[in-house]
Image (tube, rainbow, N blue to C red):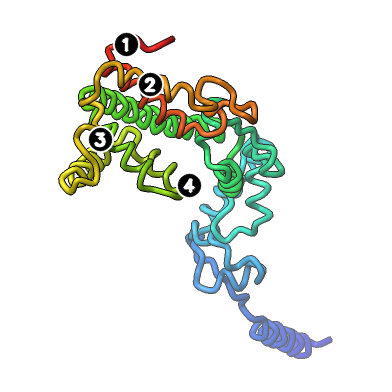
Amino acid sequence: MSEVEASAVAIETSAEQEAQTETIETPQTFIDAEGKFLPGFKEHYIPEEMRADKVFDTFSDVGGSLKMLGSLQDMIGKKGVIIPGEASPETEWDNYFREKGRPDTKDLFEMKVPDDLIEVYDENLVADAREMFFKMGLNQKEVDALWEYEEKRIRSFVEADAKSQLETDNAFAEWSAANPDKMHWANRLISENVTDDAHKEKLLESLDNNIAFAEFLSNMSSKFKEHKIITDTEQPTGMLPGEALTEAKKIEQTPGFLILDDKGQLMKDVNRTEYDRLEKERDRYYQLANAVKPG
């Protein structure tokens, strides 16, 4: 081959190489020279079903993503629980609660009601509490702490009520001891003017330990005396000691009061309200008679 031909071949080969070079496209990149991610990197590098994950917003360059990958690798195999997010499915929350120690069903929670507070607890309280504790994903230790607090809370209310009731009882006992005539007429006004036994029983229950109600009924009896419906001589305070003692004995002879009635029953077992009323009435007669109440 002559030099001319060789030169022509070389020129042609060089031209072909230049043409091939021009047709090769520069590949598109979403990472700049400093390693930072450029707009569109999610669409180019991350599968579509994962692009919405917030984790990809926590880093902005290759170095940050590799650092996070290394941290996740260190966590693999370590003991721990990953807390689900607000958008996590219920199954993930169930798994998380199970890892925390929540039982498989709410009925497995141990929640004992103290024997002395059984009558105080609402019948639905335990069931509602179990349901709430289960939804909260609590374990038995957490339930124990909350249930112990609930017991203390209820017990404080019970003790406060008991203290208040004791104060009321003492105040009424002092008042009734100082005003036997008023109590007599308060009881008598109900007993002689209410025909319905159920209503009479409720009114007598309301009278017990209620100074204001007793005062009201006593004042009503005064109005009756003013209109001659009853007379002053009927008041216990106007009785002779012997008469008061007779009245006390009459009450004790009431069937069922001290001895069994014709059905073989005692009044205190079948009608405690009436028994308590008669007992108080008898005690007042003994007080008027200056007699010692039998033991």
> Disc 4 vs disc 1: Cβ atoms closer than 8 Å?
no
Q: Is residue 8 above or below residue 238?
A: below
Kind of residue indicated by mark 1:
Ala
The crowding category of the residue bearing disc 2, from other C-alpha atoms within 10 Å (few below 14, some 14 to 19, many at least 20), is many
Label 3: state its secondary structure: helix
Tag nearer the camera, 3 or 2: 2
Say which of marks 3 and 4 sits in front: 4
Which residue is labeled 2 in the image? 248
Mark 3 belongs to which amino acid? Answer: Ile
Q: Earlier in the sequence, mark 3 or mark 4?
A: 4
Whole-number angstrom distance, CA of label 3 to CA of label 2: 24 Å
Give me the C-alpha separation between circle 1 and circle 3: 26 Å
> Which callout, 3 or 2, points at the residue further toward the start of the chain?
3
Is 277 situated left or right of 290 in this image?
A: right
Q: What residue is at 24 percent from the left and 31 percent from the top? A: 235
Which of the pair 34/30 is nearer the observer?
30
Quadrant containing the N terminus in the rendered view: bottom right
Of the image marks 1 and 3, the number of the one nearer the N terminus: 3
The disc label shown at residue 198, or none: 4
For disc 3, the marked residue is 211
Task: Quote the CA–CA distance across marks 2 and 1.
Answer: 10 Å
The three-letter amino acid code for the residue at tag 4 is Ala
Occupied quadrant, residue 239: top left
Q: Is mark 2 on a helix, strand or loop?
A: helix
Q: Is mark 4 on a helix, strand or loop?
A: helix
Q: Is 89 on the left-hand or right-hand side of 177? A: right
**Quarter of the image with the C terminus in it:** top left
Residue drawn where x is 51% and y is 65% of the image = 37
Are the residues flagged by discs 2 and 1 in contact, CB closer than 8 Å? yes
- Residue on which the image places disc 1: 291
Find out whether the residues at labels 3 and 4 contact each other: C-beta distance under 8 Å: no
In the image, 101 versus 47, the foreground residue is: 101
